[in-house]
Each structure stands twice: as C-alpha cells, then as structure tokens.
Image (cartoon, rainbow, N blue to C red):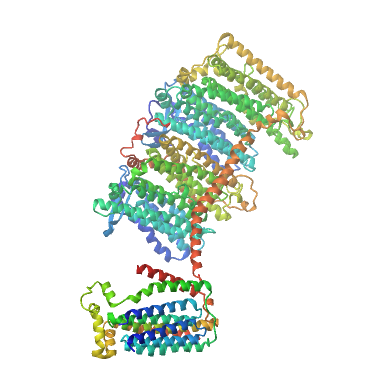
Amino acid sequence: MTFSLLAALPQVGEMTVATGAARWVWLAVAFPLVGFLVNGALALKRPEAKTAVSVVGTGVLLAAFAVAATVFVQLRGHPPDAPIIVSLWSWIVSTGMDIQFAFQVDQLSVVMLLVVTGVGSLIHIFSVGYMRADAGYARYFAYLNLFVAFMLVLVLGSNLPVLFIGWEGVGLCSYLLISFWYGDKANADAGKKAFLVNRIGDLGVLIAMFLLWWQVRSLEFVTIAARVPGTLPVDGGIIIAITLFLFLGCVGKSAQIPLYTWLPDAMAGPTPVSALIHAATMVTAGVYLVARNSVLFAMAPTTSMVVAGIGALTALFAASIGLRQYDIKKVLAYSTVSQLGYMFLAVGTGAYVAGVFHLVTHAFFKALLFLGSGSVIHAMHHAYHATHSHEDAQDMRNMGGLRKYMPWTFGLMLIATLAIAGVAPLSGFFSKDEILAAAFGRGETHKIWLLFWGMGLAAALMTAYYMMRLMAMTFLGDNRTGAKEREHLHEAPWIMTGPLVVLGLLSLIGGVINLPAFFPAGPHHVLDGWLEPVVAAASRLMPVAMPHGATEWALIGGAVTIAAVGLVLGWKLTLANPIPTAHDAPEDTGFARVLFRKYYVDEIYDALIVRPLVAFSRVVLWKGVDQGLIDGVGANGSAGLARALGWIGSRLQTGQLGFYVVVFLIGAVWLLRTVAQ
Amino acid sequence: MSGQTVFYILAGAAILSALLCIIQKNPIASVLWLISTMFALAGIYVLLQAQFIAAIQVLVYAGAIMVLFLFVIMLLNLGRDTGDLRGMPVRLAAVLVAGGLLGELVLLARVTPGSMALLRGTAVGAGTPMASFPAGQAGAAAPGAQGVVGAIAEPLFRTYLVPFEITSILLLAAVVGAVVLAKRKL
Amino acid sequence: MTAFLASIGYNGWILHVLLALPLIGVVPLVLAPAERAKRIALAVTLVEFILSVGLWWSVETISGTLQLTSSTPWIAAWGISYAVGIDGISLMMVLLTTLLMPLCVLGSWNYIGQKERGYYAMLLTLITGVIGVFVATDLFLFYVFWEVMLIPMYFIIGIWGGKNRLYAAIKFFIFTMAGSLLMLVAILALAWSVAAKTGTLSFDYTHLLANAGAAKALAPWLFGAFALAFAIKVPIFPFHTWLPDAHVEAPTAGSVLLAAVLLKMGTYGFLRFAVPFFPSVAASPFVTNLMLVLAVVGIVYGALVAMVQPDIKKLVAYSSVSHLGFVMLGIWAATVQSVQGAIMVMIGHGLSTGALFFLVGMLYERRHTREISAYGGIAKVVPVFSLLFGIVALSSIGLPGLNGFVGEFLVLLGSFGVHPVSTGIATTGVIFAAAYLLWAMQRILFNKLDKRENEALTDLSGRELAVMLPLILGIVWLGLYPKPVLLKIQPAAFKYVESVRGGPAALDLVQRPQEPGR
Amino acid sequence: MLLGPSLLVSAILFTIGVVGVMLRRNAIVLFMCIELMLNAVNLTFVALSQVLGLGGQVMVFFVMTVAAAEAAVGLAIILAIFRHTRSVDLKNINLLQG
C-alpha cells in the first residue's frame, strides 16, 4: 500500500485525523498478510524450508506486536478525545452511501490489538516447536498468519462491513486450521461444522447491519453511537431487534448456547490453534462486538438481560459438561465456553470493562492451559510414537504422575489452574470477582440478576473442581502411560516452555490491570480509566451498581471459599480411587454418561435439523419438485403428449385402401349435405 | 315409341347392368356388364342430341378401356371366382353412405330448365325458360350449320385449347408411367 | 487515454467492429487446417478483448443515457434500423463477454478433440450474438441477435457435449425459443400500438420508450410476454430445469459462457426492456410480490437442491439459479443500492461461476467424471488447483473481501428497506450457499485420498493457470476495490429505479424511510 | 328435354359405383366401379350441355382422357403389385400404413 494511497484518501466524518503512530496502524494488518503470502508461496513451492517459514511467521507477528505497542504508547501519551480513523480507500460506493475500508484506533481496539498480537506471538513461538515434525509446517504458518491478519481487521474495523470482513475471515481461517489434517474425515467435518455454525451467526450480523443502515443511514461505529440515541426510542422494538440480531452473531462466533457445539469439535485442529483461536482471540470477537456497540446494548435493557441470561446459562451448562470429559482438550474447550459465558454475563449487566478485563486475563491463563496441554500431548505422542502403541495421546486416563517428568509444565499449569479457579492474588480472581460483584450489584434493582449471580457462583465451583481434576489426573498420582513409554516422557523443549513461562507470569500479575479499590497496594481501576471514553455513553444509560463495604467483603470471602472448596474436592475425589487406563475403562453410567455424551446435544441437532433438511431437499425438492413436477410434467410431459398425439395419428393410416375410401366418402356425403342446405 | 319410353328402357338397362356389374363374383362377368352399361349410356347420349359423344363413348370407352380391363384380367388369369365382398361393418357403412348419397341426389330429379333459370335469377316470364340460356340455344342450333362433329370441334379448339393440350401431356405421362411400372426390369 | 481514443475516432466504429470482427474471423478459421483453428480463434478473441477495453474510458455513463449510439435504416419500410448504443449496464456485460471469450478458447484448447473448426466458428458467432443483444437499441435487432445467440449455443451443446447432449440441447433450445416467440409477438404489438398513436412505425428503443403508454390496454399482456421470455432465460424458479441439463452436457467453454453471460441476458432484459416499458404493470403489487416470492424461492430452493446434487456441474448450475435469485430480488426491490447490487452480482457471478466451471472442466479433462464421490483428498496431490478452487468457491459463497460479497451485500441491504421479510429469508440463502459449496469442496479436496486414480492427477499446467489468473485477479480486485465499477453502473441503476418508481428515486436520497416493520 | 330424369339416372349410377367401390376387395373391380362413376358424371355433363351449351360435351372428352390415363396407370400398378404379391386382394396391399 503505497504512501501516496494514504495521503490521497478522504477522511470520514467527525473523527480526529490520524496523526503520529496511529497512521501506520494498517501496518499491523499488513505484516501478517505479507507473512501469509510468503509462507503460502513457500508452502506451495518449497514446503521443507522450515527455518525460513518459522522466521517469517514469528517475525511478522512480533513486528505487528511492535506496531501495536507503539500505537499504545502514542495513545497513552496523549489520549485523543475521539477515536482516530485511518481510512485506506473507499470500498462500497452508492447513492448516499460511501463505506470506507478504514481502521479505527481507540482505547478498546488497542487493548484487543495488544492481546491478539501479544498472545499470538507467544503461540507462534510455541508452534515452531510443536509443529516442527509436521509436513504441512509452511501451510500451517500461512494459515496462522492469515488468521491474525483477519483478526486484526476485525478488531480495527471502523465500520460494521469491515468488521464483517474480519468476522468471516477468522471463520474461514478457523475452518482451514481445524481441518488442517484434512486426511481423515472427522477433522474435515469439524472444520465444516465450525464454518457453518459461524455462518448462521453471521446471518444475524448481516441483518443487524441492514436494520442499522435503514435507521441511521450509516454503518460507521462512531456515527451509529452518535445518531442512534437520538433517533431510536430506548428499549423500542427496533433497537431490541438490532441488538438481538447482533447478539445472534456473537452467539455463533463466541460459542454460546445454542450455537456452541462447534467449539468442542474444533479441538480436532492442532493444539496451538485451539489456544490461539478457540481460547484467546476469535471466540472473544463476540464480546468485542458487544463492547464496541455498548451504546446500542445499553439502550436495549431487555436484550442485555437476554445476553446476561444466556451468558450465565452457558457458563453453568458448559462447566457441568466439563466435569466428566476425559480428553484433556475437550475439558479446556468446555471451560472456554463457560468462561465466555462469564464475559457475556458481564457485558449483559453493563459491566463492559469487567467483560474486557476477564477477556484479557482469560486469554492469558487459558492460552497457558492449552499450550501446557499441548506440551503434555506432544510428550505423550513422542512416547507412544517411540513404542508404536496406538493409545489416545489426549486421554487423561492414560496420563498420571507427569509431575516427575514435566516439572515446568506442571508448575505453570498449576498457576493457570489457580488463576482460572479464582484464587486470591492471581488475575482470574479479580476479573471473575468483578463480574460476579457487578451481577450481584444489579441484582438489587432487577431480581433476575441474583439468579444469574447464583448460576455464576455454581459455575465457579465447578470450574475449580474440573480444573483440579484435570491437574490431578494428568500430573499427580501414579503414572498410567505404561512401563516402556515412561522412559520417553520428558519436558518439552525450551522453545515451547518459554512462552508458557511468559504466560504464567502474565496470569500471575494479570490482575494488576484493573485492581479493585479495596486492594491495599498498586494503582486502582487502571483498565476502567483507560476504557472510560469508550464505554462512557453506555454506562450513563445503564449504570453499574458495584456493591461496597460489607457486602463487597462478603462476596469476596464467598468467592475465595468457593474456589478453595472446588480445588480440594477436585483433588481429593479424583485421586480417591485408582483410575483405569483408557482402553480398559468401563463405560460411564447414569448421569455421568449424559455429561460425557455432552447431553447428546450434537446428536439432537443432527437428528432435528441437519438430516431432515438434507433428506427434505433431496427427496422433496430435487426428486419431487425438480425432476418430478417441473421436468416430469412440464418439459417431458408435454413432449410425451406430442408423441402420443403422433401415435394416434399414425394409427389412422391403416394401409387398407378400403378404409380410406369409406372415410373419404363419408366426408364427401357430409360435405354435400352442408353445401346443399 | 316416343323418345321418352326409349329413354326409360335405356336408363333401366344401364342401372340394371351397373348393379349386376358390382354384384358379380366373377370379374370377367363384371367387365361385360360394365360394357353393357356403357352401351346403354351411349344410347342415352344419342337421345340427348350428343351423337358424337355417343360414338366416342362406344369407340373409346367401351372399345378401348374396357378391352384393356379384359386384357389385364385375362393376363393375370383372375377369371376365378373371388369371394371378395367386405365384412359386415363395411356393408353397414356402404348402406349408410348410399342412403345419404341418394337422399341428396334424388332431389336432382326435379331440376328443369325453369328451376335453373330461377336459380339464375332471370325473369321467368321472358318467353320459354330456355330463353335465359343463350348458350343452350346456340348449342342446340349448331349441329345444323357445321354438322355434329363441327359443333363440338369449335369450342374444343377455340375456348378449351389449353386444357386440350394439357390432356395430351397427361396421356403422354400415363403411357410412360404404364411402361415403367409394368416392365419387369429396366 | 480518452484523448488517444478520441483521436482515432474510437467512439464511432468500436461497436460495429466488436460485432463484425468475430464474423470476419470465422472465415480464415474455417479455411485453415484443423489444428491452426484454435490459434486463429484465440487471436481474434484477444484482439476483440483489447479493442473492447477502450470502452471503459470512452463510455461516459454519468448521464445514464445511451452512449455511442448510431443508427442506419435496415428495413426502412417497417421502421427497423440497425441501431446500437451502450450504457452502464451493457458496458459491463460487453466487457465481461470479451474478457471471457479468449479464456474460453484457451480453456478448451485440448478439451475439444473433434471438429475444432466448427467449434471455434460457433464460439465466434456466439460472441457476435451476445454482444449484439447487449448493444442493440432497436427492438427488432435485439430480437434477431437474441435468436442468433441461441443457435451456436445449441450446436456447442448438441455436438460437443456429453452423453445425452441432444436432450439437453433440444430442451435448452425449446425453452428459450418458446419464451422468445412470445416476446416477438409482444415487440410487434408494442411497435404497432405505438405506431397507431404516433403515426410512424419504428422499433427504435428510445422512441418506443417515450410513448410506451400507447399500449396501455395491452400493457399487462405485453409485460407478461416480455417477463416470461426473460424469466426463462434468467432462469427464475419454475422455468429453470433446462439449466442443470444444459450445464451437465455442455463442454467447459459452453458451460462457462452459458453461466457467465447468457443467463445475464434475462436480467438485462428485465432492466432494459420489460420493466421500463411498462412501469405501471411492473410496479403493481401483484407483479412485484409474485416476482419477489419467486426470487426468494429461487434463492433458497436453488441452494437446497444444489446441496444434494451428486454431480458437481449440476451443483454449480443450481448455485447459479440461487445467485440469479439474488439479482432478481435486487431488481424487484427497486432501490438504487439493490439494483446496483444486482448488476454487481451479475458481474461477480460471471467471474466466480465461470472460474468454477473452468476448474471443474479441468478436473473432467483429467478424470472424465463429474461425480463428486469419484474424488476425495486430492488437495495433497494438486495443491495449486485446490488453492484456486478454494478461492473461487469462497468468492461464490460471498466471503467478504471477495467479489461475491459486495454484490450480495448491496442487494440484501437495498431490498431490506422495502421488503424486510423476504430479504430476511433470502439472507438464509447465504448459509445454504456456504453449506453446499463447503460440503462439495470437502468431498473433493479433503477427506481420505483413497482412490488410486486420484493419486495420478497432475496439477494445473501453464495454460490452465493463464486461464485462471485473470479470473482470480478479477475476483480479488472486485472484492477489495469495486468503487470504479460501482460508480460506472450507478447512473444506470439510478435511472432504472427512477423509471420504476416514477420520479426521482425518492427512497434512496438521504431521508428517513417509513418504518420497515410493516 | 329429358334433363330431370337423366340427372336422376346418373345419380343412381354414381351411387352404385360408390357402393361397388366400398364393397369389393378386388382391385380391378374397384377400378371398374370408378369407371362407372366417371360415366355417371359424363351423363350429367351431356344432360346439362343441352341447357348450358356445348362446353359440357367438351368436358366429357377431357373426362374420358383422364379416365383412360387413370385406367392405364392403375392397371400397370396392379400388374406390378400382382407380380410381387401374387394377389390383387386389397387386404394385403397395405405397405403404406402409418
């Protein structure tokens, strides 16, 4: 993109003209895009040039992070009063419409920028080690770079269509990465399922866009935030429809009930992919969308209630399924769905900053957990590969006692587990506590929020339980992998554990971003201050009543005890009786089976929607209407009619002269009679 | 006996022999009866003052064409008795058609020069009905001046010259056709 | 650039040359020996394309009226003249045709084994027919070119087609012919009723348009005849069964042209003739609702039936029915955005479906089967092919950033204001589009590479890449920077909406519409 | 003048000819019946020529020539068919059927 292109472009509406580092924000997108092109070419032409690929792949990400950091610094230096718009070129032009391909730089997008590029770089470094043995190495990095590029477009987009480019782009990349090992059908199916379910969500975003356009004649976030409060009635039918459709998009993308089924299946992709896409970045796009349009959601309290409701319900529902899963990545997948439920509970209650805060901390410890499990799986693969056994390397029942072999991974994952459970000084505690406090606070005025708070608390208990169960089954107790494999178990190489350490640190001190008032030391409410200009309008419409004093302390005490109880229970119950290895473990019975089978939701969807739709379109539409009705009756039918008439005609020509004469004479006589009259 | 009775005798003979001609089982008998019908017709022509036509009828029609028929029957020795009457449904149809036809044509009996004049719309009162048919007058008077053959020749070679030439071409075509069809191999 | 064009009097002769060149090209082609035929055809089509590119600069579409018009009396007695002209819409269609033609010739390089001379001669006559339809501004001339276009297509499908090509060719011919005969009657009736009112019998487009009111009494019937002829061509839902058969049996180049250009004649017909002539009938609630229902049904029905097709070409054919359902939705919603979107979909669909058919043709050339089940996991064996197939499939699904999205987005956005419910249902079509194409892509590219023949597949050759490159460039360019094209077609869309809504396209100037929730 | 009665006779003859054509299956007899019908027509021509002028009688000539030509060609055809199928029965001459 040449500089002249930049200068020649018209600026849009009431935004500050881009100055300083913010003008180069489009570089953050350009770098991964270039990375994608280079790696893509390498994948096609010389896939074995692995070092070149890894250098380009990670280098590009670090460059993007550097750009993000400089933009952050510039914004921190002198925060602009209005969002900075960097318009590259005008994209869709029609009468009264001029949609720009433009990026918006403000506090919220910078936070997301930092998270995406930061965590993304760590995961890229981890992938260098994890994917080294894989043949499709170059292709993997190409897709990963493309994903980051699209994610940045999503985060930086200054209007809904540009956001939609990123929105569908990340869907595409998750499709490509989930079915990365497309050799076997299961992965390809999982990828297709992910894309289709996302697509159902995208339908919502599309319709919301159309509604918005016909109401305010613009799709720019800034213009929407300015015009909507004036033109649309608060809690009116239109604003509820818009926000509900937007939320439908979020449900699809961030895997909330009912469109969450694709996330657990997405574990079919490589583990770093799950860490990046299905924990840290893509799934949080839904939360970002709500936060970005906080004004709309604040103007529609009924929708916010629905958002909070579904968030709480998903948190509880997913956590319950996580209790009985044996595949280490499935547990983490359901944990992600549950934590996303928390975030939506937060933005539903109007605590947008708490939602973003939890998003950031969750990105840290969930990425750490996923990468940690990646190291474990990597080691297990290595061991099973050495002894050519075909055990499932991801099944926790085959692990156990890995503490001795992988001390670093164990230590770091323990930190992450404590963080996610909400143990005091770690980051998870602050973000989750703030959400529950906000929910409780709102509970005073709207009773239903107490129910949501209760569901959140129960989900917290379950989270602590299944995380500790995971740790116990993998690291503690005695090893079940098998005598011969044991020698091959060893710590993952430094290139993989390095990023884990950084993420561990971030999980530890993550809380500092937004320390609550009661915390003795350190700067308070940093993130609140930072995001204040973005959510100011929304919090005026839907103020968040944070409990203070006695109730606040009670809540904190409750949360801590819940966490402790969950952890102890998880540890004790799992190690109480010896755990059978995977292939001789008995089939679960009763409610446990239902949980393990994920409430049979997948099967229900398949039976109720997918199979009947396919059958309907094959039998009724294609065979019935198309072949039968239109072709059968219409085209071939009339042809058949013509042929039949022809046949009757030929029957008349019997060849018998006598017959002809008779017919001829009858005609003659009849003619005579008519003439004679 | 007056012309009237002769006409009726000849007419009866013609109809009778025609009937017998189609009823005969044996084709040769049919041919012969047909020839007798032709002779009866020739007689009627004479009565209608068409003497030349009568002569031609006897000469060409009865003489040439009927002989040709006889010759072909003899050639294919079809003299045997061939029961070739058609089945019941056709007979029914035949009766029906014949009835219909007769129903129509019997009305012709009442046609007289007078009724024709009426048809032509000329006033009946102007003398005899024949008055309104000048051509008829001339036709009847002509034999007197140029003789029977001359009367015919005059319109044949003057007004109807073109059709005459066409018929000659037709005959040529017929001859060629007959030769080609009948020859065993060219 | 415009100065250079003006200097060579480009505007004067270009349209006539575009029409005549292919026909002139046929002569050397037929005389040359068989294997040189394709080279001559390629040369002619390339020259044609290079010449046509000048149109982009020389045609000033701002005013929305017909440009470069020239008219010479042909059958003076009946007021029929050889009149040609071009405006925003037809400019785009002509450029699309001239772009695709050399690619078609290149695409069927070694696909066509027997009777090459005849084949390429047919292709060249097809160009004249197609361009003729888009530039004719004399109704009678339009009808002549409409028939001229039909005959070569019939032979291309009938002679060089697949197994039961005759059935397909005859079905295609009869379907289109039935419609066009009705149209001929309507054209004549219109011309005569106008002649009765104005005293001069003439088939000139502007003349008829000016006083189309004369045929007020017959208007519903005439509109019905025009609409039926174009509906069969589009194809709209009940009249679409000829399309899958024609596509399955047609050779690659035939399918590409059929999908990319011939289908657009139907929609072009609606935009240029059917609706502007009888705006009162077209705007009547019954007609609009009927057409909208048919469009939406077309979208959903086409997508659903495409999902279950075992044959890849039939799948793409039904996807065309679905895509053109969008175009019809855009035309009948009659807001500037939706009509502009409709024209964009017409162009975009031409590129992406054309590319898709080329790719399927290349597969067919290697494996001689179109059954999706015969393939599987070929991404490992033919990576370049899979990459291109992926890009083209995504553009036809309407992934934002590629050309499909821009058109569909504008159509849906434009029609939402006027008919929210039907547009809502149409948007679900976007999901089904993703469903059937991804499912097909998965069964062909991914899954296990279990069949032995698939391992022997060779990746794309230089020639095939040359065919695909311009299309892929077009797809990405239109997706990211459609502004110039959008500006070119905006005036034509604006004028069309004005003629349908009578008076300035009120709905789209920046001013609040009524509550959409009715 | 005998006009009325002769027209009646020709009508009767014509009807007999028609019946003959319909009833008989033998090709030759069929021809004869046609000849009979032609004669009936001749009779009407002659009868009316008294009233309408000699043109009628000229027509008789033409009818005769046509009859002759028709008889010649017809019989030749029958000869050819006979050589082929050894019979003149109409029932089995039906090659030209639909």
Name the residue rendered at 68%, 24% in the picture: A466
Query: How many callouts does the rendering have?
Result: 0
> In this rendering, would A251 be left or right of A670?
right
Where does the image place residue C491, in percent across and percent down from the top left?
Answer: 34, 41
- Depth check, front residue: B53 or B111: B111
Quadrant containing the N terminus of chain D in the rendered view? bottom left
Q: As drawn, which residue projects farthest toward the top?
A: A550
Could you say which quadrant of the image residue A142 lies in? Answer: top right
Residue located farthest toward the left when viewing the structure as drawn? B126
Quarter-of-image position of residue B16: bottom left
Q: Is residue A588 left or right of residue C317?
A: right
Residue A212 shows in this picture = yes
Does C252 sit left or right of C147 as displayed?
A: right
Instruction: Tell me residue A144's x, y (percent).
Output: 56, 36
Query: Residue at the right extreme?
Result: A483
Left or right: C369, with A541 as reference point: right
D8 above or below C352? Answer: below
- Above/below status of C304 relative to C188: above
For the point 36% across and 30% down, which residue is it?
C512
**In front here: B112 or C517?**
B112
Q: Position of residue A230 (x, y in %)?
A: 39, 23
Residue C312, how many percent across, how many down? 55, 50
Of the pair A509 and C120, the residue shown nearer to us: C120
Q: Do we see residue A69 in this rendering?
A: no
